[in-house]
Image (spheres, rainbow, N blue to C red):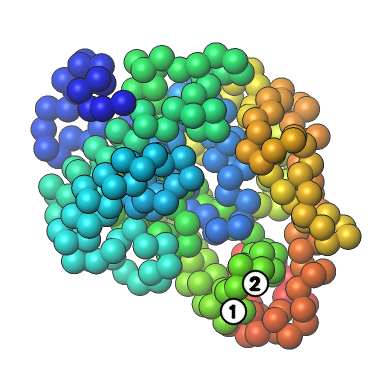
């Protein structure tokens, strides 16, 4: 969908350069391979919440599996490169573990508009197609939704930018036992030292923001999988989402680590297949032993090297390093 096909009344609300199109966004800070997709789906289950065109960095960079060829070119030429040139830094690089440079007001407005337009580009079953089970969004309904965006790893440094852009935002961080994250990342050819450094940096920023920002909240993956209903109630209260408006919650079929070390889907015949549950039945979709299964697979030497760098941050979050 092109910008010209958006509902005209929506754009009439955008009267000033410093007025943001996205109102009261829900900004997630998560780890790659940290269980973040489940958190996203719990948020998107609400009929007044939608995603932009992928995770935060994929909104501005080509490479999302759902991107058509023309969209990859558009992102590179009109989103990614111009933002880098105007700011003097690749602020949307999730592997960049450093402070972001100041972003001019006109670039902030541009970023907000790209986020907003992304919700219409993302009308696919796994993202912004269904308002309820079997009921699709209209364009007008999607236009009024609160933005949900998932910022991975080093994009925790975008918090300062986003709270300037969106004073009404809610920030939700999802922490997880670092040893499970380490095991998942080692399988993707990262080193224990790289994973430990990233974990230490990201967690320290999460803790800093929680201490200094009343609208920044750290939740835990372990809570999410052990009692998903209670976790969802807590999440919705923090995000100011009315849980009574959700007849069923959506979750995706995803591979998990089983007790014998294999990777299998708990549900479904293909990855990202959607399933809908009433809140009282949602636990049947979730395995609570994934952390334990992954940590058992982590070689002792890799565990030692990871903990040498990130052990203190794990302890700050209340995780055992024994």
- Residue 151: where, in percent of width, then height? 44, 52
Q: Is residue 65 visible?
A: yes
Q: Quick one: label 2, few (<14), some, or many (20+) residues within 10 Å?
A: some
Q: Foreground: 224 or 194?
A: 194
Which of the 4 quarters of the picture holds residue 246? top right
Q: Residue furthest front?
A: 69
Give the residue drawn at x 45%, y 24%.
48
Give the residue drawn at x 16%, y 61%.
85
Q: Which residue is mark 1?
A: 191
Q: In the image, 204: left or right of 157?
A: right
- Residue 212: where, in percent of width, then height? 40, 58
Q: Foreground: 61 or 14?
A: 61
As helix, strand or loop, the secondary structure at mark 2 comes to helix
User: In this rendering, is residue 131 above or below 269?
Assistant: above
Q: Is residue 171 visible?
A: no
Q: Quadrant of the C terminus?
A: bottom right
Q: Which residue is mark 2?
A: 186
């Amino acid at each position: 969908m092109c910008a010209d096909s958006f509902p005209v009344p929506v754009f009439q609300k955008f009267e000033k350069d410093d007025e943001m199109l996205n109102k009261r966004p829900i900004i997630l800070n998560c780890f790659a391979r940290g269980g973040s997709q489940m958190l996203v789906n719990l948020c998107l289950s609400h009929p007044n919440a939608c995603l932009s065109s992928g995770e935060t960095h994929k909104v501005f960079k080509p490479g999302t599996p759902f991107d058509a060829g023309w969209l990859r070119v558009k992102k590179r030429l009109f989103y990614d490169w111009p933002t880098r040139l105007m700011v003097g830094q690749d602020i949307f690089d999730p592997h960049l573990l450093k402070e972001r440079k100041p972003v001019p007001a006109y670039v902030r407005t541009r970023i907000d508009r790209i986020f907003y337009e992304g919700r219409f580009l993302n009308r696919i079953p796994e993202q912004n197609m269904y308002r309820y089970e079997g009921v699709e969004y209209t364009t007008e309904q999607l236009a009024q939704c609160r933005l949900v965006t998932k910022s991975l790893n080093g994009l925790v440094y975008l918090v300062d930018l986003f709270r300037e852009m969106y004073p009404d935002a809610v920030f939700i961080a999802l922490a997880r036992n670092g040893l499970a994250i380490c095991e998942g990342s080692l399988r993707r050819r990262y080193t224990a030292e790289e994973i430990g450094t990233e974990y230490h940096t990201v967690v320290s920023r999460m803790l800093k923001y929680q201490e200094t920002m009343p609208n920044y909240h750290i939740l835990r993956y372990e809570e999410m999988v052990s009692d998903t209903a209670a976790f969802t109630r807590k999440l919705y209260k923090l995000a100011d989402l009315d849980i009574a408006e959700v007849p069923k919650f959506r979750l995706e079929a995803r591979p998990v680590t089983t007790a014998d070390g294999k990777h299998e889907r708990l549900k479904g015949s293909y990855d990202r297949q959607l399933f809908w549950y009433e809140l009282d039945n949602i636990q049947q979709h979730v395995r609570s032993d994934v952390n334990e299964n992954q940590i058992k697979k982590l070689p002792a030497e890799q565990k030692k090297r990871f903990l040498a760098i990130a052990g203190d941050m794990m302890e700050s979050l209340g995780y055992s390093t024994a």
